[in-house]
Image: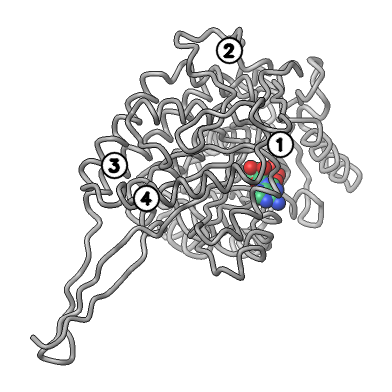
Amino acid sequence: MTDLPLSDPSLFTDACRVAGRWLRVEDAAAGIAVTNPADGSTVATVPSLPVETLREAIAAARDAMPAWAARPAKERAAILRRWHDLIVANADDLAQILTAEQGKPLAEARGEIIANAAYLEWFAEEAKRVYGDVIPTPAADRRVLVLKQPIGVCAAITPWNFPNGMITRKAGPALAAGCPIIVKPASQTPLSALSLAVLAERAGVPDGIFQVVTGKASQIGTEFCTNPDIAKISFTGSTEVGRWLIRESADDIKRLSLELGGNAPFLVFDDADLDAAVEGAMIAKFRNSGQTCVCANRIYVHDSIADAFAEKLGAAAAKLQVGPGTEPGTEQGPLIDMAAVDKMEAHLRDALDHGAELVSGGARHALGGSYFQPTVLKGVTQDMLLAHEETFAPLAPVIAFQTEAEALTMANDTEFGLAAYFYTRDLARTFRVGEALEAGIVGVNTGLIANEAAPFGGFKQSGLGREGSKYGIEEYLEIKYLCVAGL
Ligand code: ADP
């Protein structure tokens, strides 16, 4: 069925997991072709499920939930832990599948898989520590008992930039809390989600508890937002679709967790270790070909070191090996599609037209398709398009600043507030700037900020809620208090 070099070919499937059954394109009216961005070939065709099948999945989740929620947390934890171990044991195969549909280098795909399987391990542990409270009351004959209960059937809508990791991040806390989850992966990258369903079944996740549905995004979104059996939607994607989900689910007051767009600032002060800042910027900007919601979108550098920084960053970017993700040594794969290339070119053209200077890159790559040269610009100003819109591509604009206050004003001049980064060796500035940045995640002297122990999420229009950490499981729990009287 696939010519991918897998040691376990059964991990590659084009079938959705619904109500304990595997549904192929023959079970649907239409299919969705999955394309390899490295060469444009078709990797597989997954079903475009009709709305009746979605409803079947939701009903199966509703029916499966009571037994799952009633199991001792220790049992749910053991299953999650097994799922984690299977993902880690099969990481090489899962990376092949991920790279075939998404394009990122195999090593990066493997990194995504291992780093995010860790959310299953983390929440397997947290499952056992969902503590309540006993609260003394104003009346002597009463006690207040606080319980935390699973929120209900959850739906997840996930993006193509982390086809594997964005699923374990949501399924981990949901299942740990006692909730079933139905995942709609991005149409570009459903195969990683389907391979996770194969391993979930192998790990002993019961039927109806982890389901994957593929199909028309707006139809599935509408069903999730309006079906009374869905209690919560967890979404990672664009702010535009996030807003739509809020509106569409308003009648039912659905619980929402939203990880939306970013426009991360990356500040380099004149007391920073310049080489470390360049290294951090390379990670924060060029990881996943610039296609992450925490990618540095605007790089502000103190005027006295802006040119030196831009030259060093340009030299490092020019060394990145661009190629198919499966080729050994590749550091940057193709962009997801030609629309991504168009956006990068529009931002680049606008900046150059308004006086920015090219330091390195600046054109489509000789490999053709959606490959693009890693690009660094200097002399960028705050009024250019790329300072206000998320480029989501390997374009690094360097903007010079004079004072800390000016840098902060420009950094916070955005409706987004997901990640921010800054480099300094001054302790007082670390606190001052760290506290002043309007972002949910701030990297100080690092370009890599996500891990399962930390709360990931945004301020402002970057979203609602947090993933990971002790806070992450709360998103899947309701608080109930029992008022016990007559004591
Ligand atoms: P991106 O621009 O990164 O593709 P999107 O927000 O369009 O971000 O996509 C993220 C996820 O949201 C994908 O799974 C996509 O299929 C899904 N999606 C897009 N439009 C809708 C919609 N109207 N309702 C529900 N999901 C949607």
Residue 376 point in image, percent of width and height = 73, 34
Cβ atoms at labels 1 and 3 below 8 Å apart: no
- Choose the circle earlier in sequence order: 1 or 3: 3
Cβ atoms at labels 4 and 1 below 8 Å apart: no
- In front of the other: 240 or 348: 240
Q: Amino acid at mark 2?
A: Gly
Q: Can you tell which of label 1 and label 3 is closer to the viewer?
A: 3
Q: Secondary structure at mark 3?
A: helix
Residue 473, quarter of the rendered image: bottom left
Label 1, residues with CA under 10 Å away: few <14, some 14-19, many ≥20: many
Respond yes or no on whether mark 1 lies under 8 Å from ligand 1. Answer: no
Residue 137 point in image, percent of width and height = 18, 86
Label 3, residues with CA under 10 Å away: few <14, some 14-19, many ≥20: many
Q: Amino acid at mark 3?
A: Ala
Tell me the quadrant of the picture where the N terminus can be found.
top right
Q: CA distance from mark 4 to mark 3?
A: 17 Å
Q: CA distance from mark 2 to mark 1?
A: 20 Å
Question: Label 4, on which residue?
Answer: 65
Question: Label 1, on which residue?
Answer: 393
Q: Can you tell which of label 4 and label 1 is closer to the viewer?
A: 4
Residue shown at 31% from the left, 42% from the top: 122
- In front of the other: 42 or 275: 42
Q: Secondary structure at mark 1?
A: loop
- Choose the circle earlier in sequence order: 2 or 1: 2
Is residue 271 visible in this depiction of the protein? Answer: no
| 115 on left or right of 30 | left
Q: Can you tell which of label 2 and label 3 is closer to the viewer?
A: 3
Question: Label 3, on which residue?
Answer: 124
Question: Label 2, on which residue?
Answer: 329
